[in-house]
Image: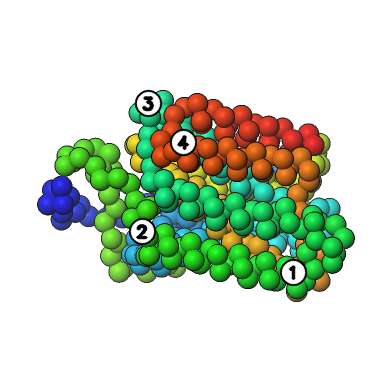
Amino acid sequence: MNVLKAGVASETHHPAIPTWTWLSPLLASLLLAVKFLHFVPSDGPVVLVLAGILLAAAVFSAVHHAEVLALKLGEPFGSILLAIAVTVIEVALIVSIMVSGAEGSGSVARDTVFAAVMIVLNGVVGLCLIMGGSRHFEQSFQLKGASSALAVLGTLAALALILPNHTLTVLGPSYSPLQAMFIGIVSLMLWGVFVFVQTVKHRAYFLDAPAEDVIDEDMTEGYHPKPSDREAQACLGLLLVSLVAVVLLAKTLSPSLDAAIDLAGLPHTFVGVVIAAIVLLPEGIAAAKSALKNQLQNSINLALGSAIASIGLTIPSVAVVSLVLDQQLALGISAANTTLLVLTLFVSTLTLGTGRTTVLQGAIHLVIFAVFLLVSAIP
């Protein structure tokens, strides 16, 4: 298999940068320029719709360029860069709401992180198990890797979202400044240890089981040659442009997002669901594609890795921002959401505790996800 795969690699050239990945940040930058120069009204309906479309496109573009750079850098630097890029997008969307001072701005970080965990563990994982199980009947994955990732995610979720409700220094669902910084530091450290274990120390725990010595369409489709130096440099520049565009578009759209939530009659906590969905959409699509190709291990790595980075990197970032803005950061979730989180972690332990999955487990996760959406829209 190694010889055959090497033959494929020698004949395969890394494709050119897709047009949409450089056109999206270019159009986003152009829109921002005409807005800042007051050539178009900032609150015009057409401008806002276009800004929303370009924001989503810039997010996909940034993730694509980060993935290309991850291939170039190798592990563990590739995973670190990808996680940082996604976190910059998430933090930018969160901070844009916090700075606006809109209603619920102090809890948008909590709502986004909680939504990210629920979307990943129930929405993404459930969809992957349904799609993969429907095509391949039963799928397998590395039990050691999945259980390790779930243990890290459960610990981070409990420290960030449940424990603040039970501390006494500050009344309410918040940490004191010292507690917030300590939790942020240990969250960052735990994420760093997880990345080290995943990419260096116990990398074999997170790899797909060896396939048969046959080159098929799925294998060649999943193979990605290392990009050239020139392509990597271009992707680095486009990644920076995409991230800047995301940050500025998020700041521009934050008042309109609040207004749209009010117009729809949804609670302000639903803003976090929207932000988390935007950030996790690219990785969620990639995870679903891997499940269809019977690469469930890769789906689990993408899904759980995104959720771990969402807490391990976002919480320290917003904790620093809240201290700079002198704004109290609400982190503790409600009793109903705590019930859903505990149920999700319990079911995920059963799902990822055998090394094999079926459509039944996927259906259970999707049911919990549907209830989460219901409770988010109608508390």
Alpha-carbon distance for marks 4 and 2? 22 Å
Q: SS for tag 1?
A: helix
Numbered disc in front, either 1 or 4: 1
Numbered disc in front, either 3 or 4: 3
Q: Taking 52 as reference, is 110 left or right?
A: right
Q: Is residue 375 above or below residue 13?
A: above
The mark that comes first in sequence, 1 or 2, is: 1
What's the amino acid at mark 4?
Answer: Cys
- Circle on res. 203: 2
- Circle on res. 179: 1
Q: Residues within 10 Å of mark 4 (few under 14, many from 20)?
A: many
Alpha-carbon distance for marks 3 and 4? 12 Å
Residue positioned 25% across, 45% down in the render: 210
Residue positioned 47% across, 41% down in the render: 353
* Residue farthest along the right direction in this orientation: 171
Q: SS for tag 2?
A: helix
Q: SS for tag 3?
A: loop
| Quarter occupied by residue 357 | top left
Judging depth in this view, the residue of 337 and 242 nearest the camera is 337
The mark that comes first in sequence, 2 or 3, is: 3
What's the amino acid at mark 2?
Answer: Arg
- Circle on res. 128: 4
The mark that comes first in sequence, 3 or 1, is: 3
What's the amino acid at mark 1?
Answer: Gln
User: Quarter holding the C terminus?
Assistant: top right
